Amino acid sequence: ELWLETLFFLFLLIAVSLDLPSYTDRCAEGSCYPATGDLLIGRARRLKASSTCGLSGPETFCIVSNLQADKCFECDSREMYNEVTHPNSHTIENIVTTFAPNRLKTWWQSQNGVENVTIQLDLEAEFHFTHLIMTFKTFRPAAMVIERSSDYGQSWQVYRYFAYDCSTTFPYISKGPVIRVDDIICDSRYSDTEPSTEGEVIFRVLDPVFKIRDPFSEHIQNLLRITNLRVRMVKLHTLGDDLMNDLEDVMQKYYYAIFDMVVRGNCFCYGHASQCAPITGGEARVEGMVHGHCVCKHHTAGLNCELCENFYHDVPWRPAEGRNTNACKKCECNHHSTICHFDMAAYIASGNVSGGVCDNCLHNTQGQHCEGCKPFYYQRPDLHKRHPDICTPCDCDPQGSLNGGVCDSVTDVARRLIAGQCHCKASVEGKRCDSCKQGHYGLGQDPLGCLPCRCNPLGTLPGRACERNTGECHCKRLVTSRSCNQCLPQHWGLRNDMDGCRPCDCNLGGALNNDCSPETGQCVCREHMFGRRCDQVKNGYYFATLDHYTYEAEDAEFESVSATQGIMDHHATWTGIGFANVPEGKALQFTVDNVPQSMEYNLLIRYEPQLPDMWEDVLVVVMRTRNPSPSAHCSLPYADQQRVSLSPGSRYVLLSRPLCLEKDKKYNLSMLLAHYSSDDHHHLPNMLIDSIVLLPVVRDLELFSGTADSEEAWEMFQKYRCLELSHTIQKSPMTDICKEYIFSASALLHQGVMECECHPQGSLSLICNSIGGQCPCRPNVVGRKCDTCSPGTFHLGPSGCRCKFVHSFCNQTTIRRHCLHSTYMFIKHKSELSHNVPFLSCCDCTVLHAQDYAEKCENGYHGNVLLGSGEHCRPCMCPDGPGSGRQFADTCYENPNSLQLHCLCSSGYKGPRCEECAPGYYGNPQVAGGRCHPCHCNRNIDMHDPGSCDTHTGICLKCLYYTEGPRCQYCSHGYYGDATTQNCQSKCVCALGSVEQSCVDGKCECDRVSGQCPCLPGVEGLNCDHCAPNTWNINSREGCQLCQCHPTHSFSPSCDALSGQCSCKPGFGGRTCEECRALFWGDPEVKCNACDCDPRGISTLQCNKSTGKCMCVEGVAGQRCDSCRRGYVGKFPECQQCHQCFSDWDVTVSELTNQTERMIGTVDEAKVTSVPAAYHDTISSLESGARQLIQILEDNEAQKTLVHNKALLQQTKYDLVAQVSAEHGRAAEELHSLSEESHKLQESMEEKQQQALLIKHANIRGAADSIWQYHQQSLEAEGQVNQATSDPQSPMEQSAGLRQASEAMLNAIQGGYELRLQLQAERLDKMNRDLDQDDLSQLSHQVCGGASGPDSCGGCEGLGCAGEAGALQCGAAGCAGLITESNKALNKAKELDHDILDSLKEVEKLHRMVSDARGQADEAKLSAQDVLSKANQSKSRVEQTNQELRQLVQEIRDFLTRGADLQRIEALADKVLKLKMPVAAGELKNVTMEIRQHVASLTSVDDILAESADQAHMAEMLLHQTRTVSMFRCVWLYAFVCVCVCVRVLQVESETAASELKLSNITQRMLDAEAGVGEAKQKILEASSSAENTNRVADYVSEVMEQTKRVTGCPVLILALRNSCIYTVRLIKLTIV
């Protein structure tokens, strides 16, 4: 058995050695591995077992044979095994293989009957584990698991399961076979009961069945690597004895016992070591022990070579694989460090080249390889990067530089880095970053370098930066704070407009004060009020109108009077239920106890006049208990008694003085109609009194008193006559202005709003009208609270009030009698007072008692239950009666007068018999089964309006709440929301960014559900009110434009929504950041230069971005704007504009200069073309005569005097008038120009204002602000008009003064003009006298050719002669005067001009001829290029033929060297000589014609000569090659060789002749073309050099052709053998084609 085990080990060693490389010099060539061994040797102390017998004391165990005492033994493992002293010790250390002779005497044994036993080996390092062999003393385990750990016991992985019955013990584990090398299976081979002793368990990590292709792969290495090995024995073989009763005795035979265990493996070094050493501080060295400390190679380190050596971290550590050592690489730190580490990110970034990162770089360096400088240092370009002084400190101001003064560490053009360059903070500039930018101050006082002005652009005046010394900003009118970022008190909404903020404008009554939120503008509202301005009331509350405190006359205490009749067709002229008809001498007593505030009230009396005259005397008396307290703010004396007259032409009257009333006090007001009229003796005068009204004196409220705004508000209140609305009964629609003022006054008067208090039964809703508080009443219900039945009705209930009828439903406490003519009467306290109630009829009622109503008919029936004989309850036929299926009323009643039946219809029905559908319902109740159904209009119709929906179809016709559609299911056009919930109150508001057609006449169209307006491209928002990201210019009306910010020069792709300005990085500017920054110019990609402008002469600090030219103000010029412009005089910067005459003359001189230059150019051109040479003498003569004429005119003072006198005579008459007219015309033109410019500016301003207003009016707040501004403007305009008409300094007064001054000035000018006219006349007379004394005869002969004076006229007219028409004449044809000579010269000049024009026409003709020749030359060039291409192809074929010739010569040489005889050569030569080739002139001529056809289209041009020279050079090269080949051929002596060589030479000669023919034709064509354009070249004298060049090139081509003929080889042989070379002729033709 021992030799079998040894043989097995050897076999394993051989198997492993086959998979591993040779170890001789393996570490230098690739991966290397230490030798394998038993890992248990020397590690007995690292073995442990979970169960060992006899550890705590002797234990008895037996063997399986029987239970006799002599077959049982003792186990005492308290001491280690010793054959002499402790032979019964069976500790775990016994399983270590020793190969001792007593191997079977030592073993390890577990406790009796313990099944779950673990043996574990804990290694001190990582090892390669190859296989395990266990030899058992007892039965092998019925189930066992081998496990491993590669992280020192932190986690475990199963190698293999072993079980006698795998399906039962490990049901979820596969039983094999093994498919992959790492498959986990359950093996049954080593779990049987046989043999009962020395049974083995063998496990191999790498099963020999598998051929491992790459044993060095990471997967295989991980499979072999272990730090711990564990064997778990989980089940004993008990042979069924465990079922016996005496279990304890039975289990003494069953336990685990192992003779020895072998764990084969080696030190795990990842292929970086071939041997291992003991671990420091580990177990003592034992022979045969496999140590755990690798002796590492490949610059690796660590217990298992799992690390790289220090300073060898440039590549990631990797295991060695095969012949690849994967050695660690030394770091490159440029001699600035000796320590580094590996960084995977750096390694990947370098393209897997270098991942070593140097640590602790010296010499102020840093970076992965210490290749850069630390912050605040930069590389000196003159030193090597390994130099100790490579890094130099930066010279940057730390307060103004980024990162405390860090500069560019290296020069890198691509990254725009310059070594030593400072990077300034955002608000700092300068080479050292030591100065603040404009708009900043305080270097070093801010993280950005300088303190920015911090002026909020919304609140700062445009174009104004902060104060450089203090940083104070220049705020807009309504903005405050140092940074202009806060609104003034009682203002809000900082925004980009002229004033910056908007007033809070809180409603003085609705808000507690005028303070609001600076952000939202929300005011602090009183209770039950809301809205930004607190100008709205919550549901269930209302604000009272000024006539809210109305006291009805019919409710007052009174005395008996008569009654009158109301008119049916008139509108209501009363309040309450009617009037009090008060006769003369009677009084009404009113009780007032609900005064809301202590103050003065105006008393208003409303009445209905009955008589035509004035009611003269009405006495009103206020009865109070005591005088008002001083807190009432009333004026003395108190007007408690006042008299007033009632006009017949009015319906109300106001007492002359207000009444002083206090809150929480009770007053009695008596109104006595004392006297009607003194002129009328009506015996019973009376007056219909409707009511009295207490109107608060609102002028005393805070709203209209105390401040200038209050005074303005009072003026507006009066202007719109808001108070008069409270006087009349018939109300007209209240304007928004009046509504707001009355709302505020009511809120101030009542300290808020008032509760509706709608009657729960009399009103349809508990929500009243927010204006006045009128509740929605049920039928026949009246009153503000709907708490009173209308006259003629009674019994206020859920359905309103019911009408009264005879003997029915009468109030038993009131005695009424029948009233005729639509009136009724009350009898009370034996005094009669008539109450006039128009439009209502009443019925007779008698006194009834409560028992009369003890019984009533059932629903659906009517009658009196107390009566008999048919008068009892009868069915209500509404229309067909109960039970008919067409009964649409619950009950009915019969009118006792008309005996008509009246049905009380059910909901949805109407008509005398309920036979029709009520408003808001549809259907056909006329037919059987017909019903009325509610119109499905989503509650968006008035259910009381008969026309709200179609009564037959139910289609909605009058949709309310801004809805529409057959079911009122859509919001109306211009509104959006949810129509089904009455939520279409939101009006479409589309801003400037919407499609133009979306808003027409102020009404916008949007999505009727979401409210989304149709936006222009690039516009977003519900209202299309802002641009999409990265766009701007919403005001363009074409949508928003892309920002187009420069991708690298800007911080982000977004820009300012209004200006489109991108956020530029430092150093860049312009709207899109594509230019240099402000005050710089140039190409930002190259260099930006500062604008160098003289500040005294520029209109803007920014110069031209491209050229750097400064923008000068008017009158200044120069690159720097430092000199006066042409047309201005003075010393810069004091430049004054020249007189207007300079501009006029400057224009004239400029035009004359241009014309003169054009004439000079024309003459010079004519001189160049030699055309006017024939007129040279004439021109010279004319020039001489002109000079003589000029000289005479300049020297003759008399002529000057004559001309001057004539001009003076003509000018004097209109001198002053023309001067005044000219000045007036210029002033008018300037005024007109200024007016047009002003008009354009005005239009532009109005357009901008209109755009701003459109934006502003897009929301209600902006519209309200605009209305307020218009109001202010209107007031200002009114004041200006008043000032313009009444102020002493008004324009009208100034205009009158100016007119007087103008008249005085005109008178003075007229006097001066008359004086100057008189002086000029005197001077003219004097000149005439002087002229008469002078002798002009000589001058007349020189100029005119005749004497002066009337006597000499008739021949050569002299001075003073006149023609038939009275025109002055001087000289004549044939006279010798200067005038005659000038006329001759003028005629000659005209003829010369005509000749010059003819010459120019000839030059133009020549020019066209040259252009045509140039076109022909271009065509010739194209043809020549085609010929050149074909020549190149011919060259290629010649080269190919030469190559074939070389091959042929080589074959001939081989043929001769192989010993061919002369007879065969001679026979072959004779055969060749017999061949015939036609060489007649005709055939050659045909070939020549073919060549000419190829070049027939060529024309001669100059440009082709150079290309022809190139072709000649190519031909020369070909001839050189031909010469070489020819000389080589002539060497051969044999006839066959000469024949073949000469045949090829003939081919070359033919090709050369073809080329010569081509060149000859080209040359001829060029000569023809040259002859064709020669005449043009001779005329324009420009092309002579080109002709000479053509001749030279032609000579050169001819010379080349002659040389070609001379160099061809073997001429005699060619002549002799020409007839035999038929194939050569064919080859020539093929080549030419």
Image: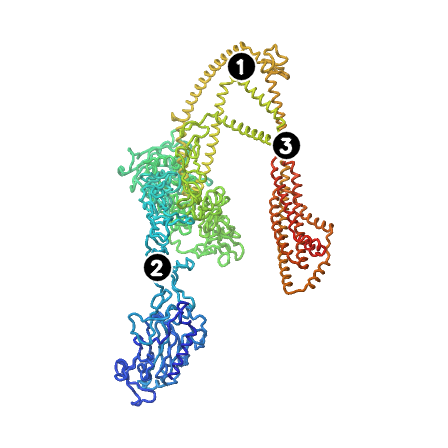
Whether residues under marks 2 and 3 lie with C-beta atoms below 8 angstroms apart, the answer is no
Say which amino acid is labelled 1: Ala
Viewer-closest of 1588 and 1576 = 1588
Quadrant where the image shows the N terminus: bottom left
Say which amino acid is labelled 3: Lys
Distance from Cα at disc 1 to Cα at disc 3:
46 Å
Viewer-closest of 1392 and 634 = 1392
Distance from Cα at disc 2 to Cα at disc 3:
89 Å
Image coords of residue 1254 (percent x, y): 45, 41
Label 2 or label 1, whichever lies nearer to me, is: 2
Q: Which residue is mark 1?
A: 1198
Question: Where is residue 1626, by image quadrant?
Answer: bottom right
Distance from Cα at disc 2 to Cα at disc 1:
110 Å
Label 3: element kind: helix
Q: Which residue is mark 2?
A: 340
Name which of mark 1 and mark 3 comes first in the sequence: 1
Horizontal relation, residue 1214 to residue 432: left or right: right
Query: Can residue 535 be seen here?
Result: yes
Label 3 packing within 10 angstroms: few (<14), some (14-19), many (20+): few
Image coords of residue 1609 (percent x, y): 65, 53
Q: Which residue is mark 3?
A: 1401
Q: Which mark is residue 9?
A: none
In this rendering, the answer to whether 194 lies above or below 483 is: below
Name which of mark 2 and mark 1 comes first in the sequence: 2
In this rendering, the answer to whether 1000 lies above or below 871 is: above
Name which of mark 2 and mark 3 comes first in the sequence: 2
